Image: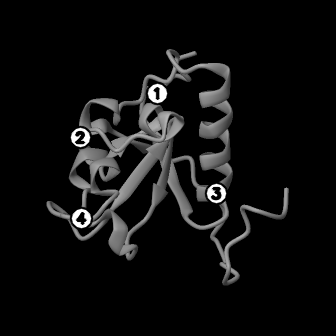
């Protein structure tokens, strides 16, 4: 798919990895407890290290170190929405979530998958 989700500057990405990443490892990759900053969506872990928006005090830090699927689907930056379970999303919100997956997959390397993650649907 091309078009609205294409990055302004071309990005060269590594082949996606499917290494298991535990929830504890993901939680540490929050830009505070580690120099890494990861965001998971639908169980895939994206490396957003280097994007200042995910650092402490920035607008998307709530997603750092978490599977933020529900929040992204709801277009929410509330702490309580930054959870993996996206089964409660409406069809329209699931479409938004899929758009986020496309957006992230064109910009950030997939460094692994959340160990034991299910689609929650």
- Residue drawn 60% across the image and 19% down it: 90
Pointer 4: residues within 10 angstroms few (<14), some, or many (20+)? many
Pointer 3: residues within 10 angstroms few (<14), some, or many (20+)? some
Circle 3 sits on which residue? 103
Q: Secondary structure at mark 2?
A: helix
Circle 1 sits on which residue? 117
Q: Secondary structure at mark 4?
A: loop
Q: CA distance from mark 1 to mark 4?
A: 22 Å
44, 72: nearer the viewer: 72
Q: CA distance from mark 2 to mark 3?
A: 25 Å
Q: Earlier in the sequence, mark 3 or mark 4?
A: 4
- Where residue 76 appears, x then y in whole percent? 40, 40
Number of the label disc, if any, that sits on residue 31: 4
Q: Earlier in the sequence, mark 1 or mark 4?
A: 4
Residue 43's place in the image compared with 38, above or below, is above
Disc 2 versus disc 4: nearer the observer: 4
Q: Earlier in the sequence, mark 2 or mark 4?
A: 2
Q: Are marks 3 and 1 in contact (CB under 8 Å)?
A: no
Q: Earlier in the sequence, mark 3 or mark 1?
A: 3
Pointer 2: residues within 10 angstroms few (<14), some, or many (20+)? few
Image quadrant containing the N terminus: bottom right
Residue 61's place in the image compared with 42, above or below, is below
Q: CA distance from mark 3 to mark 4?
A: 21 Å
């Amino acid at each position: 798919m091309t078009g609205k989700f294409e990055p302004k500057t071309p990005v060269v990405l590594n082949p996606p990895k499917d290494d298991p990443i535990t929830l504890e490892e993901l939680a540490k990759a929050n830009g505070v407890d580690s120099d890494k900053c990861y965001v998971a969506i639908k169980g895939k872990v994206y490396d957003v290290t280097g994007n200042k928006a995910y650092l402490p005090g920035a607008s998307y830090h709530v997603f750092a170190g978490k599977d933020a699927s529900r929040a992204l689907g709801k277009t929410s930056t509330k702490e309580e929405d930054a959870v993996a379970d996206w089964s409660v999303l409406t069809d329209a919100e699931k479409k938004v979530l899929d758009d986020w997956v496309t957006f992230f997959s064109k910009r950030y390397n997939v460094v692994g998958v959340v160990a034991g993650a299910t689609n929650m649907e």
